[in-house]
């Protein structure tokens, strides 16, 4: 499948609805937090300079009076166009906006386990599926392959860098299975099994290849079909600060 090559940004998203708090908080973490093993991969996964914050985000942090802001997510041509925050858990921003004010729509937030400075194999963003077509409601439209073809890229700016991800799968997940909400896999074989699984579950074949050297971004939101199902959109890193990534995470430049 041929697509226009978009150059721009990266990291990972995972959409989160209020009814998603359960899987985010209860997922077993120990088996996938073998950071001693992951140290061998830091050279390729690292993509941020924690000492440098772009002026854009300094202004945004000042505007919202919120130093939890860590990024900005955009899918061009959709209503996904929001700041991204990160708290010490995956509950705080479920029903709080970017100014810490209680709001049923909540905020778009990065999984508390992710570290934009250290680098992870998967970055996860959470957001509500609101009927007013705000937050991550637009993700549900990826059920239609033609919608995917019109919106194949996810842009994610962080405090330090600009990234672009290319969508490779869209599927419905069962929240009782926690395979899709980990940020790291200590072994390539486990990561490959995960990637193969979510590609096989896709509603359609995107034709985008993904492998163990890729860093991915995952978005997910409630389906509003049942409390136990989520729509999940995953994309792989293709660009950092306007420079194409041609060989997965191995090509990620260190700052």
Image: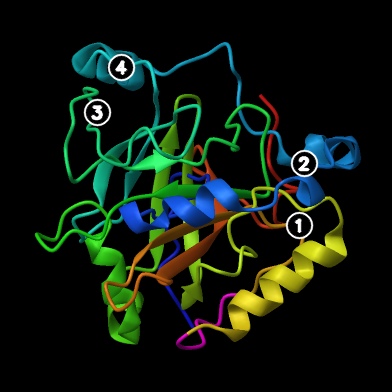
Is residue 206 visible in the rendered structure shown here?
Answer: yes
Contact between marks 1 and 2 (CB within 8 A): the answer is yes
Q: Which residues are magenta?
A: 203-208
Cα gap from disc 1 to disc 3, whole angstroms = 34 Å
Instruction: Please name the residue that numbered disc 4 is placed on.
Output: 66
Instruction: Please name the residue that numbered disc 1 is placed on.
Output: 213
- Please tell me which residue is depicted at 28% across the width and 78% down the height of the picture: 147
In primary-sequence order, the first of circles 1 and 3 is 3
- Please tell me which residue is depicted at 16% across the width and 37% down the height of the picture: 103
Dot 1 alpha-carbon crowd within 10 angstroms: few under 14, some 14 to 19, many 20 or more:
some
Instruction: Please name the residue that numbered disc 3 is placed on.
Output: 98
Taking the image as shown, residue 67 lies to the left or right of residue 124, namely left
**Which of pointers 2 and 4 indicates the residue nearer the eye?**
4
**What is the quadrant of residue 101 in the picture?**
top left
Quadrant containing the C terminus is top right
Q: Secondary structure at mark 4?
A: loop
Instruction: Please name the residue that numbered disc 2 is placed on.
Output: 44
Cα gap from disc 1 to disc 4, whole angstroms = 34 Å
In primary-sequence order, the first of circles 3 and 2 is 2
Contact between marks 4 and 3 (CB within 8 A): the answer is yes
Cα gap from disc 2 to disc 4, whole angstroms = 31 Å
């Amino acid at each position: 499948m041929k697509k226009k090559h978009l150059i721009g940004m990266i990291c990972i998203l995972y959409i989160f609805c209020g009814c998603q708090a359960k899987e985010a908080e209860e997922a077993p973490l120990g088996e996938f937090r073998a950071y001693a093993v992951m140290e061998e991969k830091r050279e390729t996964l690292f993509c941020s300079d924690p000492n440098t914050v772009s002026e854009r985000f300094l202004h945004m942090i000042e505007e919202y009076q919120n130093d939890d802001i860590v990024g900005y997510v955009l899918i061009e041509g959709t209503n996904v166009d929001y700041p991204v925050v990160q708290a010490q858990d995956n509950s705080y921003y479920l029903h709080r906006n970017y100014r810490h004010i209680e709001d049923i729509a909540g905020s778009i937030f990065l999984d508390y386990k992710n570290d934009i400075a250290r680098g992870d194999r998967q970055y996860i963003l959470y957001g509500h599926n609101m009927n007013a077509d705000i937050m991550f409601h637009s993700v549900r439209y990826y059920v239609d392959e033609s919608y995917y073809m019109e919106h194949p890229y996810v842009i994610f700016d962080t405090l330090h860098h600009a990234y672009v991800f290319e969508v490779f799968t869209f599927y419905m997940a069962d929240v009782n299975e926690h395979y899709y909400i980990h940020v790291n896999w200590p072994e390539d074989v486990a990561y490959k099994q995960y990637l193969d699984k979510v590609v096989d579950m896709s509603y359609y074949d995107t034709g985008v290849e993904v492998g163990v050297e890729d860093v991915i971004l995952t978005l997910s939101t409630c389906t509003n079909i049942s409390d136990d199902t989520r729509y999940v959109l995953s994309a792989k890193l293709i660009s950092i600060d306007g420079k194409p990534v041609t060989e997965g995470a191995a090509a990620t430049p260190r700052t």
